[in-house]
Image (cartoon, rainbow, N blue to C red):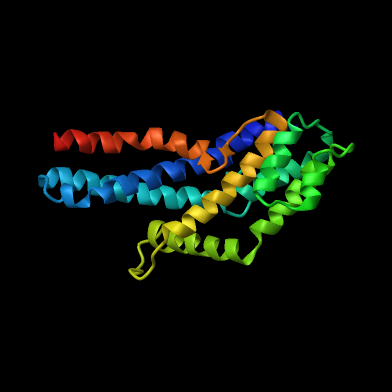
Amino acid sequence: MTDFIFDEFKQGVLSQIHDAERNILIWQHIADEKEFLETQPEDVQQLYSFLQLAAQTNFVLSVGKLFDKPKNYPTQCILYFLTLVEKRADKNLEIVEDSSTKMLLARYNASHFLIKAVNSEDWSQFPKHFVTYYREKYNSQQVQDDIKQVKLMRDKVVAHNEATESIKLEFELVQRLLKFATEVVSVFGMPYHSTIWETGKISMITENAKRNAWFVKSGIQKLKK
């Protein structure tokens, strides 16, 4: 079950989280150097302005893909991933990392039923509870309100050139959605593949995104020399 789903979510959900994180960092690196960049020649200013706008477009699209509605064909969204897990729940694949999974779930304040399902003799119980629990969280008012704001930005500003100067997307909102998405992939990856996508306050996805966004900081540092 999980080899197929693991490939799907690495290329889909996990990839979109990474892309969103990377582009947010690129946007932020440029914003942090706004005063310095404004002193540079016009062509340099245009370059970084273009990079920042492209980064904004990319992270809005990536987050939008994560929280899109699933279609009848493979999509890079969380709901589609949960449907894949649900359809294959009865394949009875053994959990290979039980203690670490329970610790991770406890850290996320997951439901008692999901934590208990880790050690169930019926191996289909964990994926079933996993899907139920995260669908409920996905449908919570907070998550739905955040999704609505991302889609408003995507549909009105990124996808279409409408007069919507009043629309703003708070980074705190985007981070909440990415934190939720990271929790989903972390809780799936740990029991079946012993993969640690997040530990304590450190996200391995974010750390990798930092490495892949470093070229912006490096470029600005060279300008300063």
Residue at the farthest right position = 121
Q: Residue at x 77, y 42 (%)?
A: 127
Q: Quadrant of the N terminus?
A: top right
Q: Quadrant of the C terminus?
A: top left
Q: Quarter of the image holding residue 200?
A: top right
Horizontal arrangement in the rendering, residue 168 relative to residue 36 (left or right): right
Q: Residue at x 43, y 61 (%)?
A: 153
Horizontal arrangement in the rendering, residue 41 relative to residue 167 (left or right): left
Residue 116 spot, x, y in % from top left: 82, 45
Horizontal arrangement in the rendering, residue 4 relative to residue 19 (left or right): right
Residue 136 spot, x, y in % from top left: 71, 58
Horizontal arrangement in the rendering, residue 117 relative to residue 53 (left or right): right
Residue 216 spot, x, y in % from top left: 29, 38
- Taking 195 as reference, is 64 above or below it? below
Residue 203 visible in the picture: yes
Q: Nearer the viewer, residue 108 or 35?
A: 108
Give the tally of numbered discs: 0
Residue 16 visible in the picture: no
Q: Residue at x 57, y 39 (%)?
A: 198
Residue 147 spot, x, y in % from top left: 54, 60
Q: Residue at x 47, y 64 (%)?
A: 152
